[in-house]
Image (cartoon, rainbow, N blue to C red):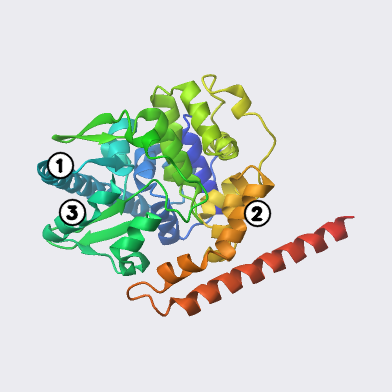
Amino acid sequence: MNSYHHFLGQLGMLLGAEEPGQNFFKELRFEEDKLFEKCLFHQMVTQVYQYREPLQSLYPQLSAAFFQQVRDYTIVNTTRIMLYESFLKELAGLFAVQGIEFRLLKGPGLAEQLYAESYLRSFGDLDILIRVQDLERVDKSLLDLGFACADDLYSSFPDAVARKYRLARHYIRHQPNELAVDLHLNIGSRLHPIQFRSSDFWDNPKVVRIGEVKVLTFHDTANVIYLLYHALKHYYFKMIWLLDIHYALDTWAIDEPLFATLLQRYDMSRMWRLFRQLRNEIFCSETDSEMPAELIRGRVLSRIARPETVFEGVLPWSHSLSRLILPMLYLSSWRRKFVYLCHQLFPPRAMVQECYRAGQYKAGWKCYLLNRSCAIWELIRMGWKARRKGAANV
């Protein structure tokens, strides 16, 4: 474990209410800019500020300038949260006039519900979930408010393709203040391995007051399911996503039978056990007696998704291969893994035509073939290395 992983590990213990030891880690060396960037990537700078005193004691070699940088960021983050609260009030009022229903995801909703102070949960944008049929009206509303589609892959897709595959859209506004909105048409796109029923998340919403406005979000049990999926669906990891679930399990009243039903319905029991393993190792958390015991038993699930991998933030492969491998860790049956892998490597022709020849992305055939061929080659090499290693051990 390198010094940066060690620092994040000690921070995790503090967040898990584990008393720090009397040891001092003076021998560890840091590039302070790199340490700050690592904390920034994990959206944990405000947690460093929260526990600055024990961290200063544990790591006396860190300069006062480093902790001043942490303090400055926390002040800026507090201001940003106030801006987003004001904008959310404006947006909710506009949607109410037009009869547009939405659900607030992550970010400010979690900051209000789970954290002692809202500034302790940093976020980069406002995530909202809307009905598919409201896409055009919401798009027009955001454009009228001065937003523009971010210059990324998803901005190239026509509305018809975005609706069909439930693709997210990213909007950004630079004036008068820089704000960003992520617009979601479903919990996950149709390209993801887990397909959710909208009714499980839209129904029985929870009212959350943020600043001067009341908004709707998922009920607590569905929200934990969503946060679990979000934390482990990417090709990278962030500590803040795991911390959200850690706090949610300690704060919210989870409907145990419903929770167990949803885990089974969406084949997320293995993902749940993987999270519990990470939670216990990072935040030194004991198993919750409230949770069904049969869902938290089990051996070590993976030698890939370990605390060191989480601290590093990325898997040791290309993004293309990581997107293929990570679902292999939590899909339960070999049949589902095989179907998902084939679907990703060799998707239907219509999907390729619509997603890679849409709008401004017509040169995407070359990109598609290059990404898939690289991923296949990496899989072959990884399998060959594993086979040689196994033979050597024998």
Image quadrant in which you'd find residue 299: top right
Q: Earlier in the sequence, mark 1 or mark 2?
A: 1
Q: Which amino acid does label 1 sit on?
A: Gly
Q: Position of residue 277 (x, y in %)?
A: 59, 36
Q: Which of marks 1 and 3 is nearer the N terminus?
A: 1
**Residue at the right extreme?**
394
Q: Pointer 3: residues within 10 angstroms few (<14), some, or many (20+)?
A: few
* Residue at position x 52%, y 27% in the image: 260
Tell me: 392 left or right of 105.
Answer: right
Asked if labels 2 and 1 touch by Cβ distance under 8 angstroms, the answer is: no
Q: Distance between the residues labelled 1 and 3?
A: 10 Å
Read off the residue under disc 1: 99
Image quadrant in which you'd find residue 118: top left
Image quadrant in which you'd find residue 175: bottom left
> For residue 338, which numbered disc appears in the image?
2
Q: What residue type is labelled 2?
A: Phe
Q: Is mark 2 on a helix, strand or loop?
A: helix
Q: Where is residue 12 in the image (x, y as percent from the top left)?
A: 49, 39
Asked if labels 2 and 3 touch by Cβ distance under 8 angstroms, the answer is: no
* Residue at position x 31%, y 58% in the image: 169
* Residue at position x 55%, y 33% in the image: 264
